[in-house]
Image (cartoon, rainbow, N blue to C red):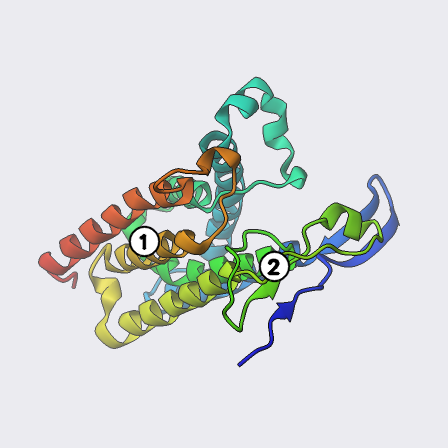
């Protein structure tokens, strides 16, 4: 079907020089995907707030909570889940997000805590907000995985399948103008995850519209947890480990961290389906 993809897309869209106070800046695909994703998520939440008779203007307050919850949670998650010994010895480096290192599990926990604070302030049920985020966040996650694709990172094992991608391994040298060095054809696990997350979005949006799933508190959040982290758990089997200590482990850190979310998803779905429908 394909003849292997040699992925040469540069992670920087364009370079901006002589910016006051900053010197020079790069606009990267990863950052653009992050921004577009949050914009789409905010517009979707605005739509669902309107459908449920809530003030859509409050979505932009929620957006700020979720943005900082995601960024802080994802960074702390990477530092504390994947290399706690180093970062606890160098705590200031936890602030250096430009050096890379964001963990989706930490980002999810950050959003969860941010929503608890937001919901209390706005006198809303946390599950009301989280259920609708269970629809709106899925395309955000898909776009962030596309950002990983543009960054030539978080790809999988070597494969002889016809859709394998050859990624650049010497990215720092490549950005400095040197010739790229490519991997062997590998699983484009970023695309696998992005496709699964988009599937979760369409399923949950359909459940909300067709079966009034929003009237069963926790159902959409449970579906999100089960399917997003369930697919993540499975895809990890063909993905390269992120840290050296994961080599030789029966389950890698991404899978271990996914298990509590999968179990929470099952519990939320069972709870929602066995409880009285909200009127």
Q: Residues within 10 Å of mark 2 (few under 14, many from 20)?
A: some
Which SS class for mark 1?
A: helix
Which SS class for mark 2?
A: loop
Give me the residue at 57% from left, 40% from top.
Answer: 101
Give me the residue at 88% from left, 50% from top.
Answer: 17
Give me the residue at 34% from left, 46% from top.
Answer: 258
Name the residue beneath numbered marker 1.
Answer: 225
From this view, report whether residue 228 is shown above or below residue 172.
Answer: below
Quarter assignment of residue 87: top right
Q: Is residue 41 left or right of residue 124?
A: right
Q: Is residue 73 left or right of residue 116?
A: right
From this view, report whether residue 103 is shown above or below residue 63.
Answer: above
Real-space CA distance between mark 2 and mark 1, rounded to the nearest whole angstrom: 33 Å
First along the sequence among labels 2 and 1: 2
Horizontal and vertical percent for residue 209?
29, 74
For the C terminus, the image quarter is: bottom left
Horizontal and vertical percent for residue 196?
40, 65
Count every numbered label the image shows and give the total. 2
Q: Nearer the viewer, residue 27 or 249?
A: 249
Name the residue beneath numbered marker 2.
Answer: 184
Q: Are marks 2 and 1 in contact (CB under 8 Å)?
A: no
Q: Nearer the viewer, residue 189 or 4?
A: 4
Q: Residues within 10 Å of mark 1 (few under 14, many from 20)?
A: many
Horizontal and vertical percent for residue 179?
81, 56
């Amino acid at each position: 079907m394909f003849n292997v993809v040699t992925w040469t897309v540069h992670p920087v869209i364009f370079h901006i020089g002589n910016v006051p106070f900053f010197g020079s800046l790069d606009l990267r695909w990863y950052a653009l995907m992050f921004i577009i994703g949050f914009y789409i998520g905010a517009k979707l939440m605005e739509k669902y707030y309107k459908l449920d008779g809530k003030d859509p203007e409050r979505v932009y307050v929620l957006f700020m909570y979720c943005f900082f919850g995601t960024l802080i949670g994802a960074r702390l998650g990477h530092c504390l889940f994947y290399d706690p010994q180093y970062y606890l010895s160098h705590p200031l480096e936890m602030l250096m997000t430009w050096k890379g290192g964001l963990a989706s599990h930490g980002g999810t926990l950050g959003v969860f805590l941010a929503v608890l604070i937001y919901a209390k302030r706005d006198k809303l049920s946390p599950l009301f907000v989280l259920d609708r985020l269970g629809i709106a966040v899925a395309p955000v996650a898909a776009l962030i995985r596309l950002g990983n694709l543009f960054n030539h990172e978080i790809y999988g094992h070597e494969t002889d399948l016809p859709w394998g991608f050859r990624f650049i391994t010497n990215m720092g040298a490549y950005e400095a103008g040197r010739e790229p060095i490519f991997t062997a054809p590998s699983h484009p696990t970023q695309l696998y995850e992005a496709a699964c997350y988009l599937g979760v979005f369409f399923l949950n949006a359909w459940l909300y519209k067709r079966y009034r799933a929003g009237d069963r508190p926790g159902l959409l959040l449970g579906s999100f947890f089960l399917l997003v982290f369930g697919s993540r758990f499975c895809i990890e089997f063909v993905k390269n480990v992120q840290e050296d200590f994961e080599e030789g482990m029966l389950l890698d850190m991404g899978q271990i961290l996914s298990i509590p979310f999968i179990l929470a998803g099952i519990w939320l779905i069972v709870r929602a389906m066995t409880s009285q429908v909200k009127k």
